[in-house]
Image: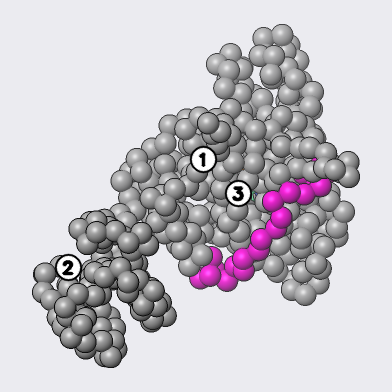
Amino acid sequence: MIKAITGTKDILPADMPKWNYLEFIVKKTMESFNYKEIRTPVFEETSLFARGIGEATDIVSKEMYTFLDRSETSITLKPEMTASVVRALIEHSLDKKQSLNKLFYISPMFRQEKPQAGRLRQFHQFGAEALGFDSPALDAEMIIIPYQILKRIGLNHLSVKINSLGVPESREVYKTKLRGFLDDKFSRLSDESKKRYDINILRIFDSKDEGDQEIMKDAPLLIDYLDDASLNHFMEVKSALDNAGIPYQVDPKLVRGLDYYTNTTFEVISGSVGSQSALCGGGRYNLLAQEIGGAPIPGVGFAAGIERILLACANENTIAIPEEKIDLYVVLLDKSLSAKAYGLSLKFREKGIITDTDYALRSVKAQMREANKYNSRFVLFFGGDEYKNGEFVLKNMADGTETKININCIDKIFAIIKGA
Ligand code: HAM
């Protein structure tokens, strides 16, 4: 039996109401902030992500689904959207048409990570990117939007962590300091951190190794080496969050797994989903557009993992989806009338009445069982003596009452079903 690939998941009809509800709240919230939806291809040229996210990151060096297509082009299934959105913005000169582009997306992403609860190889993100201005108000907006969405779907155990990574110049000064601090401790670092020492020293802060964590406890912090402009920007972001009433903690050790960040970075963490607790992450990336070959366009954004959010919702028992119902089930009493019954069902559907009927010429009992399974509000009996007398029988399944209706007056049936 062929099964779904490890780390991928079918989203079954029973799961869909929660997905649809979350996506509805996402779209409503984005609309209220005037963000416009964008969709980009599922795959891109590998160099986009290698240059955008950074060769030294785990995502690029270990996790991407990369392959040569039949014309020997290196293709990668998108591991994130930011690089794709910036590519699309530059390619279509959206920045020439509008000084600020506020864009949002909902899309599958692909990373070959070790699967566990809340960590998949095909997962889904919603997110937003605001490109054009270097305004701290936009940085704050990228925290306010996901926070509002998570609150709206009823999540409670949330914490927001923010940090600033400054600009490359101040970061280089700091990296030299950090290297100096680690020089005499290098031999005690884990193998993974030893590798990071050369290729991406900041990521040693992310190490799960206890020995590394002990060493890094006393490490100098980037936030103490920020240039004045970055520090001011950070202060304005914090005050915008204060004004919006968003609780947050400054976490000077928050280094994110993507290289494009400048200034603000943040994560929204849930206390109810176990180890994969980051529901959302993001930050400012003022140099990314140039990095992938465009003009300098400042940008900031966030992305949130839908599977993790739905896991948190399940654990916190939020999102109560009402039981699904249909409006009408047409029960066929006389098999010779099946074509007519099907034609009648189409008329109800044209009126927006959710209608189903029998496709297998089954017994009346089996059809009634099916009507009940679908929670049909009404059943229309088609055939039998009443039909011979020119009438349908419409049964209200909530109270069991039956109404006879002339077969030429189906408007009456519409009215009863819509009015009920
Ligand atoms: P990220 O932190 O890599 O950031 O991913 C954002 C969110 O996607 C995570 O917080 C998590 O909820 C979800 N996520 C990531 N990997 C997985 C996985 N393997 N399985 C399930 N969920 C996952 C970005 O992707 C950046 N593009 C965010 C951004 C937008 N920065 C600026 N603009």
Compared to residue 413, the image places residue 148 above or below, namely: above
Q: Amino acid at mark 3?
A: Pro
Q: Residue furthest top?
A: 187
Q: Identify the mark nearer the N-term, 2 or 3.
A: 3
Report the front residue among 89 and 20.
20
Instruction: Please tell me whether mark 3 sits on a helix, a strand or a loop.
Output: strand
**Residue at x 70%, y 46% (from the top left corner):** 78
> Rounded to the nearest whole Å, what is the CA distance between mark 2 and mark 3?
40 Å
**Residue at x 58%, y 17% (from the top left corner):** 209
Residue bearing mark 1: 9
- What label sits on residue 108 in the rendered view? 3
Instruction: Please tell me whether mark 1 sits on a helix, a strand or a loop.
Output: loop
> Rounded to the nearest whole Å, what is the CA distance between mark 2 and mark 1?
36 Å
Q: Is residue 36 magenta?
A: yes
Where residue 240 appears, x then y in whole percent?
54, 59
Report the front residue among 35 and 391.
391
The magenta stretch spans which residues? 30-49
Q: Residue furthest bottom?
A: 408
Compared to residue 172, the image places residue 37 above or below, namely: below
Compared to residue 80, the image places residue 32 above or below, namely: below
Residue bearing mark 2: 397
